[in-house]
Image (cartoon, rainbow, N blue to C red):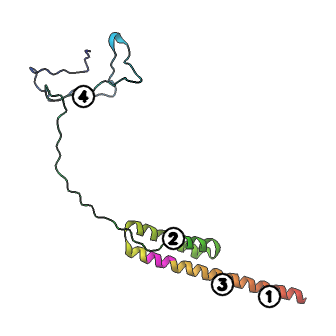
Amino acid sequence: MSNTNYQTFNSDQPNSPNPPTYSEKDPYKESGPAGSALPTGQGATAPMPPYYGSPGSAYPPQMSQPQQTVIITPVYPSSAPDYLAYSIFTMLCCCLPLGIAALVFSIQTRDANHSGNSMAAQRNSKMARNFAHAALGVGIFLIIVYIVLMVILLNQNNRS
């Protein structure tokens, strides 16, 4: 199969210092015998691109790169509790503003745990727990105040 897109190397030809340039405007096209298209489907192989190696070599040249030293420092995740479920519960059921603050610190605790920053994880865990406890306390206090006010209002309505 003779095609002008392939450059042949014979032992009497010198090495080509610059391979032919590739152009996306003129894509590589090849046709089979008598101008027919190449076979496609099962068992068909794609045409080989031109090879610009040394004459007579069947394999591409070996590329060598300098050795690089990679230092991998393992990241050990810390195990500080993140109180995520507790924060979500206090946010939805007790006190929304304090629950949101607890949720933010819970998420920061989880991120610090995954990155291995144990100091930040412990600090954020403590803050998440404190905000969640405060939200629970405020929520219980508001429920008790609501019940007391309802009892007082019902007693006043019964007396009148």
Q: Which mark is residue 21?
A: 4
In the picture of the structure, the residue carrying the numbered disc 3 is: 141
Of badges 3 and 4, the one in the foreground is: 3
In the picture of the structure, the residue carrying the numbered disc 1 is: 152
In the image, residue 24 lies in the stretch drawn in magenta? no
Report the side of 149 relative to 142 (left or right).
right
Mark 1 or 2 closer to N-term? 2
- Percent from the top left, x then y, of residue 52? 19, 28
Using the numbered discs, state the Cα–Cα distance from disc 2 to disc 3 in whole angstroms: 23 Å
- Percent from the top left, x then y, of residue 72? 27, 61
Give the quarter of the figure containing the C terminus: bottom right
In the picture of the structure, the residue carrying the numbered disc 2 is: 104
Q: Are marks 1 and 2 in contact (CB under 8 Å)?
A: no
Residue type, mark 4 in image: Thr
- Look at 16% across and 49% down and name the residue there: 66
Q: Secondary structure at mark 3?
A: helix
